[in-house]
Amino acid sequence: MAASSNTATATASPAPVAPPLPSPRLGGGALPARRRRRFAPLEPVAPGARTALGAAFFVLFVAVWAAFTLGGFVSPTFLASPLTMLREGWLLFTEYGFLQDIGMTVWRVVGGFVLAAVVAVPLGICMGAWKPVEAFFEPFVSFCRYLPASAFIPLLILWAGIGEAQKLLVIFIGSVFQITLMVAVIVGGARRDLVEAAYTLGAGSRGIVLRVLIPGAAPGIAETLRLVLGWAWTYVIVAELIGSSSGIGHMITDSQALLNTGQIIFGIIVIGVIGLVSDFLFKAVNRRLFAWSTL
């Protein structure tokens, strides 16, 4: 009994000893490592920090702009100061009916973009789902995708005049081919295992498209529409620079003739603000409709 007791005591493992806690002053431990990871590739940023960093850039940009203009480094003829830009913007709203110009531009963007989406999304889904359809349309769509929308303006003026139809068609041409190809790529990249599982469960071709391809591609299609909506804003300004009597682009053209850089810059900033707001709204709607896609 004594021998067995001594043997058990000899073979018992010693109690584990906790390692000493690293001192932050010595540069070891998890806290400094976490600090070092703040600027590591793909490391996420907290929402509050992201907002602060984004706002800091705008503050820095305006500060540099004010330093160059108010300090006399740049002539006011070529670049108005932030204060002059704000004063000219106030005059645009109070004396020149700029709010109506904004409404006309927004209507043109929305109208041309909706027309393009109505045509491009179904066509892109068909191209992505059925390869013969893709083989038939893809060369022409790819060719047209590289044509600048502004190159069609002289022809569109001849065909549709200088009214609203011409401006809507410029946005339509600039958007429809981009949406079509991007939607086709998204739909064509569906997971094959889901398609095979649907066939195994007895789904037909129509069921595959309606219950597998379209639901799976819906978040990507919505993101594509959000991106192309930003491009549509560039097309509408080009359309309004020629043969237009209203809109933000028309105001910029008139201001350029008067060398009023304050109004030109204010119009550019208004376009950016409207685009940013529409982008945030699109993102919010996408997150609400397709919350499952982030799981």
Image: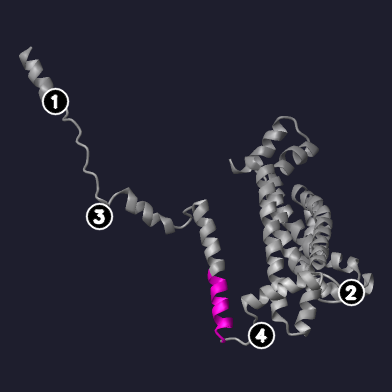
The earlier-in-sequence mark between 1 and 3 is: 1
Residue picked out by circle 4: 78
- Location of mark 2 (residue): 155
Q: Amino acid at mark 1?
A: Thr
Q: Residue furthest front?
A: 94
The Cα–Cα distance between marks 1 and 3, rounded to whole angstroms, is 40 Å
Mark 4 or mark 1: whose residue is earlier in sequence: 1
Q: Are marks 4 and 1 in contact (CB under 8 Å)?
A: no
**SS at mark 1 in the image:** helix
Nearer the viewer's eye, disc 4 or disc 1? 4
Q: Which residue is mark 1?
A: 11
Can residue 147 be seen?
no
Residue contact between numbered discs 4 and 2, judged by CB atoms under 8 Å: no
- Residue depth check, mark 2 versus mark 1: number of the one nearer the observer: 2
Magenta stretch: includes residue 104: no
Label 3, secondary structure: give it: helix
Residue range of the region highlighted in magenta in the rendering: 60-72
Residue 129 lies, with reference to residue 263, above or below; the image says: above
Give the image quarter of residue 214.
top right
